[in-house]
Image (spheres, grey):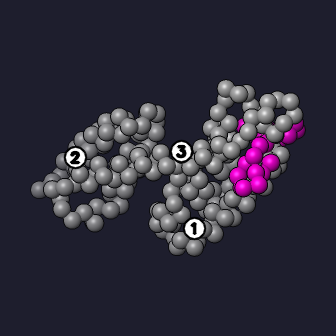
């Protein structure tokens, strides 16, 4: 018969093993910790679905692999959507970043404070879909709402985010979609980045 202490030890051993596994695949220590927490939450939430108790560790590492894939997919999605920024120098052209800077990463980090300022549930929807890289179906499942409900939240959140961004920056859109360039407005306090 398992005691609460035994269960705690099992979870801690599982956490340590998963952390070592994730740290070999994700460079940022804080991101690795966050991913392991996500894996443990997913395991706990879906424990009733486990069919073969002898394969619990294989199941756990499968969840970890999926979480790592989602992590990199989210980073690639954010980077790819912002990669269209053009650096035309500081001569009044659309971008105002140095050539050595990564404009995709800069703009992605710039969006985080705006997303966090959005009212729930819109900020949460954009965090899941745009920053964490979940599909809208996955985000809907995680939030416990319908897919159409999640799509609506994402669409409204994007509209709110667009309004916030155009308050601080002049954004030039590419003909094929996406951002062609941007220029921060000179007003003090107009932009958080």
156 or 107: which is nearer to us?
107
Where is mark 1, residue-wise? Answer: 150
Rendered-image quadrant of the C terminus: top right
Residue identifier under label 3: 75
Query: What secondary structure do most residues of the magenta stretch adopt?
Result: loop
Q: Is residue 35 above or below residue 130?
A: above
Name the residue beneath numbered marker 2.
10
Q: Name the secondary structure under disc 2.
A: helix
Rendered residue at 73%/60% (across/down) = 159
The magenta region covers 172-193
**Residue 99: image tag:** none
Locate residue 189: give its quadrant: top right
Q: Earlier in the sequence, mark 2 or mark 1?
A: 2
Residue in the foreground of this view, choosing between 20 and 93: 93
What's the distance in space between the residues labelled 2 and 3, CA to CA?
32 Å
- State the quadrant of the N terminus: bottom left
85 left or right, relative to 166: left
Residue displayed at 46% across by 33% down: 28
Q: Residue at x 54, y 45 (%)?
A: 76
Quarter of the image holding residue 50? bottom left
| In the image, residue 111 lies in the stretch drawn in magenta | no
Whether residue 173 appears in magenta in the rendering, the answer is yes
Disc 1 from disc 3: Cα separation: 21 Å
| Closer to viewer: mark 2 or mark 1 | 1
The mark that comes first in sequence, 1 or 3, is 3
Q: Looking at the picture, how far across and down is residue 120, in whole percent?
A: 63, 60
Q: Are marks 2 and 1 in contact (CB under 8 Å)?
A: no
- On the rendered structure, is 112 left or right of 49? right
């Amino acid at each position: 018969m398992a005691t609460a202490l035994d269960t705690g030890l099992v979870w801690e051993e599982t956490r340590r093993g998963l952390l070592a596994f994730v740290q070999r695949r994700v460079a940022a220590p804080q991101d690795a910790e966050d991913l392991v927490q996500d894996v443990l939450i997913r395991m706990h939430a879906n424990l009733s679905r486990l069919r073969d108790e002898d394969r619990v560790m294989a199941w756990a590492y499968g969840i970890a692999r999926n979480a790592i894939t989602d992590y990199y997919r989210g980073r690639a999605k954010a980077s790819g959507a912002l990669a269209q920024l053009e650096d035309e120098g500081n001569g009044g052209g659309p971008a105002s970043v140095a050539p050595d800077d990564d404009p995709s990463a800069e703009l992605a980090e710039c969006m985080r404070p705006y997303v966090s300022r959005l009212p729930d549930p819109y900020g949460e929807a954009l965090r899941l879909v745009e920053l964490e890289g979940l599909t809208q179906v996955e985000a809907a499942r995680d939030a416990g709402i319908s897919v159409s409900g999640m799509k609506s939240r994402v669409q409204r959140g994007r509209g709110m985010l667009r309004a916030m961004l155009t308050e601080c920056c002049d954004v030039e859109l590419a003909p094929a979609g996406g951002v062609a360039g941007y220029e921060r407005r000179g007003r003090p306090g107009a932009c958080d980045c």
